[in-house]
Amino acid sequence: MNKKMLHRVISFFMILIFVLSFGSIDSRAESSDYTIVVNVTQNVVTVYQGGQPVKAMTCSTGTYTPRSGTYRTSDKYTWHYLVGGVSGQYCTRITGQILFHSVPYTRFGDNSSLEYWEYDKLGTSASLGCVRLCVEDAKWIYDNCARATAVTFVTDNTMPLGKPATYKISSMPDEFKGWDPTDPADNNPWKIYANSACFDARYYADNNPDVKASFGYDEKMLLNHWIRNGIREGRRASNEFDVRYYKSTYADLRAAFGEDNYAYVRHYINNGKRENRKGSENNIDESEVEDLIYNGLSYAPIYDYDYYIAHNKDVYNAFGDNEKAVFNHFINNGMKEGRQSSENFNIKIYKNNYPDLQKAFGDDLKKYYVHYLTNGIKESRKATVDVGKSSDKIPSENSQNSDNTSQVTTKEGIDYSPVYDYDYYIAHNKDVYNAFGDDREAVLNHFITYGMKEGRIAKETFNVSVYKDNYADLRSAFGDDTKSYYMHYITYGKNESRKCY
């Protein structure tokens, strides 16, 4: 081989080594007003903008990390070889061999080869000297902090934005623990599961109180818990998918996956949804919402979206104008909780009207709704008024039922009807109706025990304030003992034709 050829070969290998060693270098030099402080003692990176802290990152520093001084960033690499034959993503050089970079990978360019045991050390001193970060944070510095960004190292206890929580992933299933949970790569299983129909962070928190108590609505920590524990435990994390239902519904999947819950979730994400397999018993599609149909049964006679959200503010606050989610709530929760969803059906009245249904269904409220739809309507059963009443309307503030055949007005030998009417009382005291509904004895007891003492009006033809103001002899006798005015009218006042309204 002549000298000219030898020179070319040597040059080629030098270029190859350069590329493999440094990856792709980003030489962008746009200006930035960010500055960075690395707290080596606390293993926290704080980013400042205009002198104000704007972002905190948990990191790992090490033996040779500077303890003081300010440096300026320079070269950037999407992938870069590190000491020990490992490599890192989104590397930004701080000074010399000290860089910001991701937790190391065992294979250059392979996002699935993360040293997960090192990832668990984020927040502690674990590197030789570089500043390790999760991919999301390393990429943020790579993308947002231009060359010559000032980086200051300190060893005090200053953490103006605190220290963000981090994942522990060593105990995760193999398909997850080789990946940084924050890596934005499209094939990151963490990202795939998080964005799938199987996971909804708010749903997971709201339907698993113990998890919510630990993590609130922190989406990252909720996802971590679901993947680490929730799937294995069969916890439900979305309205659309219930692993227990999915497993029990499809024999072919049970034969293939047995008790491997992760396999069922993986199948639904990769195949099941596309194959139109049903992911949960309560999974309602858009056409069903439009027709108010669930499991072949039309709920139109007892469900009205506008009525439901108007009378159940917590539902509207949770789901707003998402009609599918609101209908889902009614199907999954509203009926069980006895919520009214239409002026045409009152579960309390329907239950109280029919002893045969009480005997059959007990306190399983959902069955009363379904019975009304499947049988009650055809049988002309009443669901908005007590049997025997003349009106099919629920009591309102402007209506008073004159038919007292169903009234309960007597207690311990005293007839309170001169000052009390059930319909009037619940119509003008919504808190009482919300508490006791159609339990007439409970409503009367409330009036006797509290209502009279509080001066509540329980009948259109008796106003205790008027009665008190009209008669000085009663004020002299009873003073501010409001209940005594009611009792006087019942015992004497009515017979004496005293004016009370």
Image (cartoon, grey):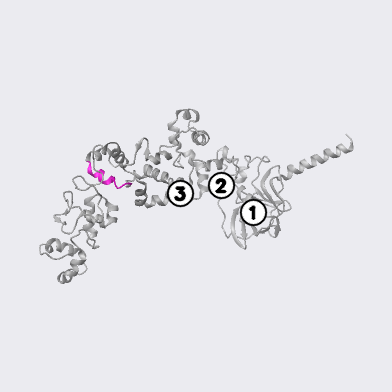
Task: Indicate the position of residue 90 as horizontal and vertical percent values.
Answer: 66, 48
Using a 10 Å C-alpha cutoff, classify the residue at mark 2 as few (fewer than 14 neighbours), some (14 to 19) or many (20 or more).
some
Give the residue type that dot 2 points to.
Tyr
Q: Distance between the residues labelled 3 and 2?
A: 17 Å
Q: What element carries label 3?
A: helix
Residue beneath disc 3: 212
Residue beneath disc 1: 144
Q: Which residue is drawn at 46% across and 47% down?
A: 202
Quadrant showing the C terminus: bottom left
Quadrant showing the N terminus: top right
The residue closer to the viewer here, 324 or 489, is 324
Is residue 440 in view?
yes
Give the residue type that dot 1 points to.
Asn
Give the residue type that dot 3 points to.
Lys
348 drawn magenta: yes
Task: Answer with mark 2 or mark 1, whichever residue precedes in sequence.
Answer: 1
Q: Is mark 2 on a helix, strand or loop?
A: loop
Task: Answer with mark 3 or mark 2, whichever residue precedes in sequence.
Answer: 2
The residue closer to the viewer here, 59 or 325, is 325
The residue closer to the viewer here, 392 or 273, is 392
Residue beneath disc 2: 167
In magenta, the rendered stretch is 341-354
* Left or right for 243, reference 71: left
